[in-house]
Image: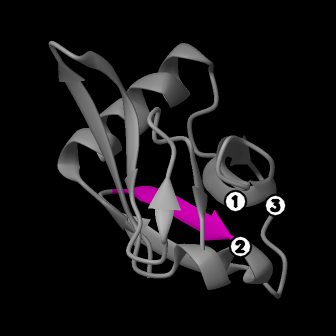
Amino acid sequence: MIHLTEQAVAQIKNVQELEQKSGLNLRVSVSGGGCSGLSYKLDFDSTISEKDKVFEHGGVKVVVDGKSYLYLNGMTLDFSSGLNGKGFTFNNPNAKKSCGCGSSFSA
């Protein structure tokens, strides 16, 4: 399962409204690259395939492809707007190590 904090849900809805993408799914995936080998990717998508895993939190539908799910199962997506900057953070129990910026990891 992929979890979203209340702050992440609020920010996702805010971005959907600003980008006129209300009603679209949040697609979370992993791709090769970044300092540690794998990078997180967030995008809005209208499609769901039969191999996708689908979760819903606070009215936001989260879609993850089967391959990415192997690396993301149990992850919590959060949003922080503190003094150290603002942005989405990925709390992934499957990451063996991650880079300093938190946008890439190795499993």
Q: In which quarter of the image is residue 88?
A: top left
Q: What residue type is labelled 3?
A: Thr
Residue named by callout 1: 29
Circles 2 and 1, Cβ within 8 Å, touching? The answer is yes
Residue at mark 3 to residue at mark 2: CA–CA distance? 16 Å
| Disc 2, SS | helix
Q: Is residue 10 left or right of residue 29?
A: left
Mark 2 crowdedness (10 Å alpha carbons): few <14, some 14-19, many ≥20: some
**Residue 37, percent from left and from top:** 73, 55
Quadrant of the image occupied by residue 60: bottom left
Q: Mark 3 points at which residue?
A: 47
> Measuring 41% from the left and 35% from the top, which residue is drawn there?
13
Q: Which amino acid type is shown beneath numbered disc 2?
A: Ser
Give the residue pinned by disc 2: 68
Query: How far is mark 2 from mark 1, CA to CA?
Result: 5 Å
Front-most of 105 and 27?
105
Mark 1 burial class by Cα count in 10 Å: few <14, some 14-19, many 20+: some
Q: Which of marks 3 and 2 is nearer the N terminus?
A: 3
Q: In this view, does 86 lie above or below 3?
A: above
| Mark 1: amino acid | Ser
Secondary structure category for the residue under label 3? loop
Q: Is mark 1 on a helix, strand or loop?
A: strand
Q: Quadrant of residue 11?
A: top left
In the image, is residue 40 above or below residue 48? above
User: Where in the figure is residue 99, as x and y percent of width and height?
Assistant: 51, 43
Residue 93 disc label? none
Residues shaded magenta: 59-64
Instruction: Characterize the magenta stretch by its predominant secondary structure.
Output: strand
